[in-house]
Image (spheres, grey):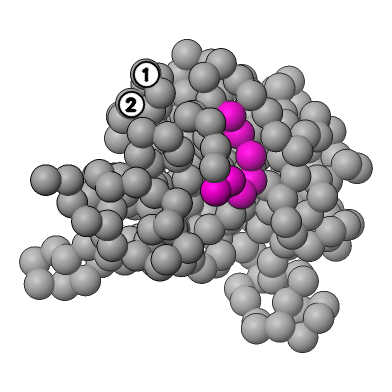
Amino acid sequence: MNALEFSFQDQTLYALPTGGLFWPSQDLLVVSDLHLGKSARAARFGGAQLPPYETTETLTRLASDLHSTGARRVICLGDSFDAPMLQGALPESDLLTLTTLQAGLDWVWIEGNHDPGPVELGGTHRRSLALGPLHFRHIAETTTTPGEVSGHYHPKATLSLRGRALTRPCFLFDDTRLILPAYGAFTGGLHCHDPALTRLMSRGAQAILTGARPCKIPMPGLAPLS
């Protein structure tokens, strides 16, 4: 499994190249902000034209991560669909793929701000979920208990590599909270030096850039620890 190991709340976690999070002791794969149906929503409501196969690409990525990790449990951290009731607009082949992926797994949909949870699909539907020392929700709370795991912001960071700027989606984590990148294809992102993120993360926070070779760097935009 190609992933970067790190510790959060004394738990060994793995940041996957795709933006998924694997928690081996719980057999758990966590993904956030799939935004399935983004291109379908854009076509329906006159938004920007996007490649028509973004949902297929996202589900293919998810299938690969389930296979490589062997996860038996899945948590989708909200905004799984790009708009309420959008699952009905997906091609039948994508819906079949999704239900096939769910078969035999303990699957939890966390409510997001784009979707209230796809209640027509199988799985458990929750606003938040506590599992051991970790607490899963869609949007980070300003004041929170240690162990919060969330999504929503689609963080990304830029790394200077051999004189070139390389921007990738990224995980952000400090002693209290962990924010996942968007998992879906063509979801965009928010630079982690944005005040919306620097206000949440403490000094010494780290960023893990996704991609073929995930790498960890100090979170840009924060004062380093002295």
Q: Residue at x 75, y 38 (%)?
A: 127
- Report the residue marked by disc 2: 7
Circles 2 and 1, Cβ within 8 Å, touching? The answer is: yes
- SS state under label 2: strand
Does any portion of residue 182 appear in the rendered image? yes
Q: Secondary structure at mark 1?
A: loop
Which residue was labeled with disc 1? Answer: 10
In percent of width and height, residue 216 lies at: 24, 45
* Kind of residue indicated by mark 1: Asp
Q: Give the amino acid at mark 2.
A: Ser
Horizontal relation, residue 121 to residue 201: left or right: right
- Image-based side of 103 in relation to 178, left or right: right
Quick check: 144 above or below 118?
A: above
Is 44 within the magenta? Answer: no
Q: CA distance from mark 2 to mark 1?
A: 6 Å
Q: How many marks?
A: 2
Give the class, few, some or many, for how many residues have Cα within 10 Å of label 2's Cα (few <14, many ≥20). few
Identity of the residue drawn at 61% across and 73% down: 51
Q: Dividing the image into 4 quarters, which one contains the C terminus?
A: top left
Q: Position of residue 29 (x, y in %)?
A: 55, 30
Above or below: residue 83 compared with residue 107: below
Q: Position of residue 170 (x, y in %)?
A: 38, 52
Disc 1 packing (10 Å; few <14; some 14–19; many ≥20): few
Part of the protein shown in magenta: 135-142
